[in-house]
Image (cartoon, grey):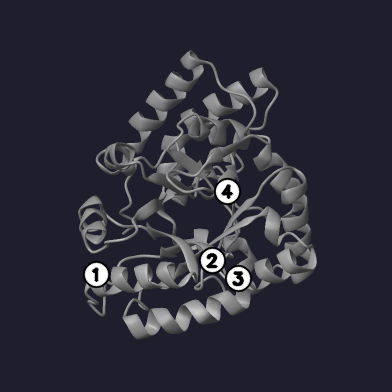
Amino acid sequence: METVRLGRTDMRVSRVGMGAWQFSGDAWGAISYDQAKAVVARAVEVGINFFDTAAVYGRGRSEEYLGRAIKELGLRDRVYIATKIHGEWLRRIDILTSVENQRRRLGVDAIDLYQIHWPACWHNTPICETMKTLEELVNKGLVRYIGVSNFPVQLLDYARTCLSRTDIVTSQNRYNLVEREADKELLPYLRREGIVLIAWSPLAKGVLTGKYTPENLPAFEDVRRNDPLFTPHNLKLVWPLVEEIRRLAAAYGKTPAQVALNWLVRDPWIYPIPGAKTPEQAVENAGAAGWMLSDDDWRRLDRLGWEISQRITYVTW
C-alpha cells in the first residue's frame, strides 16, 4: 500500500490506518484475542501499518490485545502504535501513572502517538498542566508525538500555546461523508497549521456501507444503540447518498465502504482509521487506497454528503 508522511512527524504510514476500538469486547460485540490477532496479522499483510487504540477501550483490553498481537507476530519494527489517555485522567499525576500502564499493556518502550481522548470536562484540570506533562513525556522519550481528540478549535489552539519544545501533530475527530462539522472551522485551521485530522468513524459506524436501512437496523448490541444516525429519520435522509455510493462502487468495481473511504483519502490532511472485526474487513479497508474517484464523482459525493449532513438532527427525544 502507498505510504504517506503523517503530517509533521517522521512516520511513514499506510494511506489507510486501523482503529482498534472493536478489540474492546464491550463496544462492538464480543471478540476473542485470537480473532483480534488474526485481524492485525492480515492488516499488516495487506500493507496497513498504523493502529489506533485507547485506554478506555474495554478498560485496557484493546491495548492488551493489540500489544500482544504485535509482539507475538514480531511486528513492532513494522508498525506505528497510537493510543489515547482517558479524558478524565489529565492531571499530571494521572498522566504519569497512565502512560506507564499503557506502555506495559502495549509492550512498548515508547508510544508513537499519544493523544488526549477528550478535554477535561468534569475535573476542570488546567489545560497547560496537561500539555506540559505530555511534553515532559516526549522529552523523556516515553512518547514520540502528541495529539488531541475531540477538541474544538479554540481549545486546540490554546493547548498549543502551553508547549515550548514540541507541538500537537494530529487532531482525531469524527468525520465522514455525512458528518461534516469539522468542515466549518476545524479543517481549515488544521490545514493552515499543518496538523493532520485522524478521522474516526470514517464509515459513519456502518451507515455509509448501505447495510442498514430503517427496515433493517443493527441489532443494537453495541455502541450504535444510542447513535442518532441510526434513527429512521436520519437513515432515510442518508439513503440517497448511500445509493450514489453504491452506484459508484459498481462503476469502479469497488465496495461501498471503499468508495466512502476513498472520498477521504483524496485529502492529504485527512487520515481515516476504519475498524475491522475480521481479516476480510481489514482487506476491504486496505482496498480503499491505491486508486482515486474522478474529480466529477468526488465532487458529486462531496456536495451530496454536505447537503445531507446539514439536515441530519442529533436530537432523539
Of the two numbered discs 4 and 3 on the same chain, state the one appearing first in sequence: 3
State how far apart marks 4 and 3 are (Cα): 17 Å
Task: Point out residue 62 in the picture as x, y percentages from the top left corner.
Answer: 61, 69
Q: Nearer the viewer, residue 260 or 162?
A: 162
Of the two numbered discs 1 and 2 on the same chain, state the one appearing first in sequence: 2
* Residue named by callout 2: 111
Viewer-nearest of discs 3 and 1: 1
Identity of the residue drawn at 32% across and 46% down: 313
Residue type highlighted by circle 4 = Pro
Q: What crowding class fits label 1: few (fewer than 14 Cα within 10 Å), some (14-19), or many (20 or more)?
A: some
State how far apart marks 2 and 4 are (Cα): 20 Å
**The label number, if any, that marks residue 63 in the structure image:** 3
* Residue named by callout 4: 274
**The label number, if any, that marks residue 161 in the structure image:** none
Viewer-nearest of discs 2 and 4: 2
Viewer-nearest of discs 2 and 3: 2
Q: Does the CB distance between marks 1 and 2 fall below 8 Å?
A: no
